[in-house]
Amino acid sequence: MSMKKVDFDNGRIVQNICQTAFPMLVAQVLSLLYNIVDRIYIGRIPGSGTEALGAVGLCFPVIILITGFTNMFGMGGSPLFAMELGRGNKKKAAEILNTALRLLVLTAIMIIAAGELFCTPMLRLFGATENELVFSAPYLRIYLLGTVFSMVGTGMNPYINAMGYSAIGMMTVTVGAGANLVLDPLFIFVFGMGVQGAAIATVISQGLAMWFSLHFFMSARNEYRLQAGCALPYAGEISSLGTAPFIMQVTNSLVSIACNSVLMQFGGSMYVSVMTIVSSVRQILDTPVMAITEGTSPIISYNYGAKRPANVKKAVYVMMALALPYTFVMWLLVLLIPSVFIGIFSQDAALEAPAVPALRIYFAAFIFQSLQYSGQTVFKALNKKKRAIFFSLFRKVILVVPLTYMLPYLFGMGTDGVFTAEPISNVVGGLACFVTMLLTIWPELRRMESCS
């Protein structure tokens, strides 16, 4: 396998972003397949597909929480790691890397223990009935067993990308996602294990991805070796910067619980299945814009650490030039052909009828998502922790959750109100985040330029 490294020192900014973002896009698309493929196959289980799809959707808050902790130590530590690389401080960079790995493993073990103890009460809290627990409880219990695999395999990828080995990061995910594509139908249909088979296939696949990632770090060609130990010298800094991406995921979990609760009351389990499809489409469409912004993040961090403000600004311009057109095109496609997106997950005509208007409402302002992601990425990449955390909380906790309850109950919008909360938060939150980024970061970069 090629170990070609992206040259952050001498390469052109556009070239660097493309070299980093494209493998990251492929990696994130494949990573998305872990859960998306489960839903695609689960929705097609004869006789119980629609019910099983909604039941597995009730596991989302826990899965999102695991992703949140993974992002906390992965995305939280990698900008610090990249800045130290830009400053030429390899010793500190290596210590940050090892601290992040230990945090990922310790947290995963605690999640497994808590999840296995409180699995059923949690699912009941999320709105699961006895019928849905038949599908959701076995799926979640098995899925939790792979938490170490999932967190280490995914959480170490941002460090691989920050070193410039984005192709290796892509291959790490490809190994796991490819295995999942093969194993899912085998366990679900051939072995007749249903939703439990989907969870087993995912755990095995995540284990393969983790093995591939660790194999890279243990290889003779990698200069930042993993070391055994319990010391956590940069845990505070990593966790602090990682609080923003963690909050983004945790608030997604909170929103998922709120949406399922209100939808169950106004539309029943059918609308929980609709929300599962809408959330799945959202994950698919978010992936490329996240790859663009996260692919730009190490370039921003590296050039900021190397005191090259002009390159930081150029990286932000390129990021927006890629993100805005993409979100505009996807927005048009969802409005024009929503049935195509719904058909990925279900062929149930009864489910498609409410899902089409729900999808159109939910994605009514998708283009503003690029502003939110871009602003958040700049704050995180430059270690502006307070602003990154604030705008994570602002869009979801201050806007989406209250609107999810207010629009259906106070304004009589019923199920439509739940889906309307998202576009309102996209416009208000996206604009607020991006405008604040321009008003605060640009003056700092101009001052850096005048001093150099």
Image: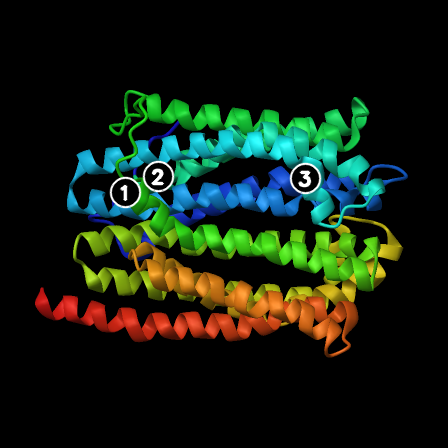
Kindly indicate whether the residue at mark 1 contacts the one at mark 3 (C-beta within 8 angstroms). no
Kindly indicate whether the residue at mark 2 contacts the one at mark 1 (C-beta within 8 angstroms). yes
Q: State the image coordinates of residue 329 (x, y, percent, origin top left).
A: 58, 66
Mark 2: amino acid: Tyr
Q: Nearer the viewer, residue 250 or 179?
A: 250
Q: For label 3, count other residues whose C-alpha is less than 10 Å away and answer few (under 14), some (14-19) or many (20+).
A: many
* Residue underneath mark 2: 159
Is residue 76 shown left or right of residue 114?
Answer: left
Quadrant of the image containing the N terminus: top left
Q: Earlier in the sequence, mark 1 or mark 2?
A: 1
Give me the residue at 53% from left, 68% from top. 398
Between the C-alphas of marks 3 and 1, the distance is: 33 Å
Q: Earlier in the sequence, mark 3 or mark 1?
A: 3
410 in relation to 200, above or below: below
* Residue underneath mark 1: 81
Tag shown at residue 37: 3
Q: State the image coordinates of residue 441 (x, y, percent, origin top left).
A: 28, 68
Q: For label 2, count other residues whose C-alpha is less than 10 Å away and answer few (under 14), some (14-19) or many (20+).
A: many
